[in-house]
Amino acid sequence: MLHNFYSRRSWAFLGFALWGMIFSTQVSCDGPSISTPWERHQIQPLRDETWYGTFTYKFEQWSDSDDGHTSGCLSQATKSTYRNTTTIDVISDENGARIAVTSDTRSRDTETREECSGCIRTEIDDLRRKANGTTEADIYIGVSLEDGISLLDIAGWDSVIENIKRVRKVHNTCTGNSENTTQGTDEIYSYFSELGEVQTGHTPGQLIVHGASEEVDDGSSSLHYRITKTWRFTNYPHVRLVIDAVNLDNWRPLGTVWNGTGSPPTTPGATLSLVASLHPKPSVAPNPIPKATKITFKIVESSNVPGDAMNSPLDNAANSLRDLQFQAGQNPAMTFVDVDTIHTPSGLVEEASAVLSSFDWGAYGSVTAEAVLEDGTVLTARFRDTGDNPMRIPKRESTSYIADSWRLAAGVADLPDSSDEETLSGGAGDGHSGDGLTLYEEYRGFVANGQWGTTDPAKVEFHVYNGLHSYPSILTQVTAGIQTFKNATGLNVHSNYREADFEQASDPSDIDPSKRVINFNALHEGGRHRVDQHIIMLMPSINPLSVVSQTHRGPSSPVNIPMIEIGQMTDPGDIAGTVAHELAHSANVPHHGENGHDFVTWIPQVTDYLEISTATPAPGVPITLRMEADGSLAPILANPLQMLLLSIEVTDPTKGSRFGGDENCLIRYYGANAVKWNSKPSAERFLILPRETPGTQLCSDGLGKTFNATVRPDYSPPESRPSRHGHAAPNRGNCIHRICINDAHAHIPQNAP
């Protein structure tokens, strides 16, 4: 089966062409002869020459589409990307001709449907076709010196195998997940026939055959393409210019932290040593070949993404230095022309070096080199003596701006730059994958408290500003709460950010979505920015006397959470649990219920207490206080007990208590001081001792396991007593499967404390 590339704009006939067929002329007695290009242009074939030189063919094709619509309660969104780059490189010398084929095709189709039932179905279809191989070839050249025309024919001896892998993933929040992988192979055949120019060289008898062409689409279709071809051959020993870089395989760009004030720093974050050399070197070549009078390095392309990292600097990002450039101070032995161009000083050379400076952690671009030989010939460099020109910086796939070395280390070699599909381990989450950050954004990284770092593309990242970092008396507890949240959710939490790292919300009512963005220095090209992802602001309560903590507008996704307030008068022993609880709301996790609680005050009397509450204001109603553990009467204390939390049994089957459900779930309210059961006399309250402890996990169902179970196992000997707080409300609990922090799936804010 032939490679389906031939069905698009192609570079070859299907199969091989025999040399005899090229010269054949069919004669018909009834009509005119059918001539070959050789005859039409009166080109004389040169059968006995050895040709030295190269031919490079490059085919690029790409398309992007993004569409969506809503019909009633049904919504559907589709997104497609397609990238293909094929390079065919031919080298000819005294050892014969060789064809090297490198082809990489990536396509991704994503369809997301949100059904009226509430189910979310996402289907991702990934196709990868990749070839990298060589075969020997025949090269035939003919010339017409009178017309200055040449004809070049190249025919590969064999095909190059292309590997094909297709992965289809389906994620359904109601029916589960599935994945299907198919693999196969295809073949790529190479044959070219090109008209070009011919001229005589400086050496008697030398012929130089060369040509170049470019074809691009007319823009009428969403599928775009570009085809470029260049070649140069001579019948005398040939010298080539080869470009490479020191440790390029492991190099990645870096930036320098800049706060946006004054002039941007001129010290590069990283440098890359470029080397361009003649091959073979004239000084050791067996036959006389010219040296170079000048070797020039040129930056063909440099990125100029705002800032130097995804969130740095906060201000004046547009004034940051261009990402890649030459600097005179880094190249004292070279003649500096401008930031794009430097060259060797006067004199004959065989090799030259240059230093390229990087000022951005996500920098990308390409460089080339040119050599002017003694005989006046101008050579364009070839990366590592292959057809790649210009040389991509950093070393990367043609469809990517990410260093291959980082991809390999992170285990994401096959993912596109636009990928945002991380999932939590163990099937956690609500079915929405990703963390709002594309692969390129995670690679480019973030600055937190003056330090740059990249994130882990295999993990779901969550960003927190700890506004309590200046409260040393409780910082340990706050940090512990963040860690509890991290352990319970499986999110990779980053909490070292400071005020200068993002634009803050001014107060709990500030819902401006342009604030709190953590990836604001965005590169939108090729889907490399999916959504403005927001940081969570964990702040001390505005009221310094408050004991109330609240996730404003939560539970919801981070975009809808202007801030979390932690009550400054919260008992230090409750801070860790409170922080974990409120952070869970900012990850879209709701309470186990919204009922079953009240704040009360107990005023001691001679034999009982007076209870003042929302339902029974002063002077209050008499109550009897018993121990929940055994039902015995509690002692009468001397002083009033104020601001106590009373758990009230919820009998409505459609509702539930905030104290109900799995006892070890951190979203469950744990601070109840007493409980009121409807099965007991209405004036009786049951004191809870010892005090309940905060949960450290997220539950996987809505059921109580110990004191909240229907039949309680927490009494010895076992006896049937009322469940302390009951199960979670219907459609609540199962908190581990409610997590969603990706702002591309912004959930409706609920405004729950």
Image (tube, rainbow, N blue to C red):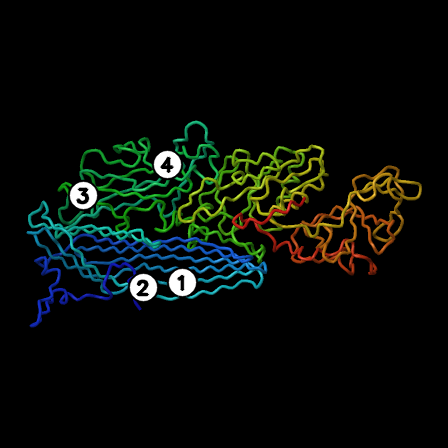
SS class of the residue under badge 2?
Answer: helix
Query: Which residue is outermost to the front?
Result: 72
Q: CA distance from mark 3 to mark 2?
A: 37 Å
* 667 up-or-down from 269: above or below: below
Q: CA distance from mark 4 to mark 3?
A: 29 Å
Give the image quarter of residue 23: bottom left
- The amino acid sitting under disc 2 is Asn
Q: Position of residue 300 (x, y in %)?
A: 29, 42
- The amino acid sitting under disc 3 is Val
Which residue was labeled with disc 3? 378
> Given this view, does label 3 or label 1 mark the residue nearer the observer?
1
Instruction: Give 360 or 303, whichever is nearer the viewer.
Output: 303
For the C terminus, the quadrant is top right
> Given this view, does label 2 or label 1 mark the residue nearer the observer?
2
Which residue was labeled with disc 4? 322
Callout 4 crowding tier (Cα within 10 Å): few <14, some 14–19, many ≥20: many
Instruction: Give 594 or 42, whichever is nearer the viewer.
Output: 594
State which tag comes first along the sequence, 4 or 3: 4
State which tag comes first along the sequence, 3 or 2: 2
* 501 up-or-down from 419: above or below: above
* 155 up-or-down from 609: above or below: below
> Given this view, does label 3 or label 2 mark the residue nearer the observer?
2
Q: Residue 4 got which mark? A: 2
Which residue was labeled with disc 1? 165
Q: Residue at x 66, y 41 (%)?
A: 550
> Given this view, does label 4 or label 3 mark the residue nearer the observer?
4
Q: Residue at x 53, y 35 (%)?
A: 503
Q: Position of residue 470 (x, y in %)?
A: 62, 32
Q: CA distance from mark 2 to mark 1?
A: 15 Å
State which tag comes first along the sequence, 2 or 4: 2
Q: Residue at x 23, y 58 (%)?
A: 98
Q: Position of residue 474 (x, y in %)?
A: 67, 36
